[in-house]
Image (tube, rainbow, N blue to C red):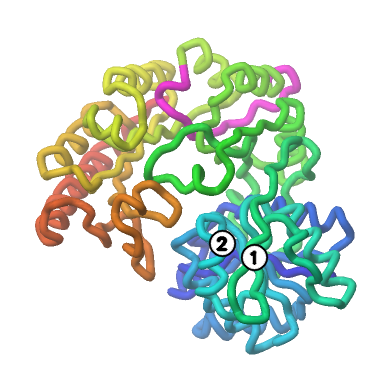
Amino acid sequence: MRVLLIDPPQEFLRCRGQARCVQPLGLGYVGAYLEKHGHEVRFLLPDTRSYIGDDPWGELRAAVLAEAPDVVGMTAVTASYPAARRMATEIKALLPQTTVVLGGTHASSNPVRSLLDAPDVDFVVAGEGEETMRELLEVLALGRGVEAPDKIAGLVWRDEDGKGRYSGPRESISDLDALPFPKRDGLVWDEGIHPVFYQAMITLRGCPYRCIYCAVPSSNDRRTRYRSATDVVDEIEYLRTTYDIPYLFFHDSVFTLHRGRTVEICQQMIARGQQVPFACQTRADRIDGELLDLMKEAGCHQIFFGIESGDAVSLKKIRKKMSLEKIRSAVAEVKARQMRCTGFFMVGFPWEDEALIRRTADFACSLDLDAVSLFSATPLPGTELWDMAGGDHMPENIDFRTPQVNLTSMSPEAYRAVYDDVSAQLKAYNRGRIGVVSW
């Protein structure tokens, strides 16, 4: 079948080019898997396009019409779900017989509601999409529609009464090495693609932690599964050979989660001559000096820590179980090796007041980080924070860098005032770090 995979437009619709330079790896994996099983796969990734005309929706409609897909598959996080709904409506108006399927973290957090809130979406895939999409396409290719959809695990559909039905979760893929590398070609718009598009990788799926603001625990993906070191370094070699990448970013939420495997990846990179400058995300309590030395030898030059708070009580409440001393020590260990270190922080949790918010900002500025990023606590469906907030606090267009939702006991005006103040403090800190070389 002819399949068009779409990352719903957000910045594209505001006529901003290349807002998202990184390939959506979930779509890349699904595309490669479907292609392996005989389907023709193309990508429409509007937010990676550098040139945008005066009529973005017109450009999108023309691109979809030219592709004439049998099936459209879209991925959506909560922030892009409204664009996905609109995209489904546009597709159905152009090509009524085209089957529209929605997946991604937002759909997985509440699959039935995600379907019913999007009347032009035919099916929702909850959880990992490779096998569910393959089975769905097999049935659609027979031309009979979906017979006994409850037999396809991870699928949501409408019954004859229009009610959403869910077949139940699909078991997570255990052997990640059996998956092909993500598909990175076949773009509808391939002009002006930023080189960073080809520099993203993941080496694991799932996460054992239960941070209250994160949707992963709700996605049936707590069981962490790892790619082997050999498979990871094989992909690095493939990316360097095929796309001549000068840089690499590991998008795992906790790259160093399994210390022994991280050591093996770095050792293989060195032994096979695949050292390449790379960055990764991890936790402050999952690194040590010996591991950092090896990572630096393999090419690591920047680490991003999700620190979140400068208050010990808040760290405990959000289930970020580590001490402030551990965070300070971890940052110092990274900096001592002339590696860049960036910290992410979040304020505005329900129990926070002005003093606590300012404590986080002061702590961020005290760590000698190369850069800091501040976010306002925004509850996502399927998270514990969503439940704590009572649900239905989601703005139509999400921007985590501004207080669209006030969860604190302060008035909205008071919370915005203190947020704007500490945001200005951290922006001034970042400006002061410009030109400060740490490697």
Residue picked out by circle 1: 156
The circle drawn on residue 111 is 2
Nearer-the-camera pick, 139 or 439: 139
Nearer-the-camera pick, 56 or 356: 356
Q: Secondary structure at mark 1?
A: strand
At a point 50% along the width and 74% down the height, the residue shown is 117
Q: Secondary structure at mark 2?
A: helix
Q: Residue 54: horizontal and vertical position, in percent? A: 50, 84
- Identified by mark 1, the residue type is Val
Q: Is residue 79 magenta?
A: no
Residues at circles 1 and 2 in contact by the CB criterion of under 8 Å: yes
Indicate the quadrant containing the C terminus: top left, top right, bottom left or bottom right. Answer: top left
Q: Is residue 122 above or below residue 360?
A: below
Q: Residue 269: horizontal and vertical position, in percent? A: 69, 23
Q: Earlier in the sequence, mark 1 or mark 2?
A: 2
- Identified by mark 2, the residue type is Pro
Give the magenta-colored segment's residue range.
270-287
Indicate the quadrant containing the N terminus: top left, top right, bottom left or bottom right. Answer: bottom right
At a point 38% along the width and 42% down the height, the residue shown is 212
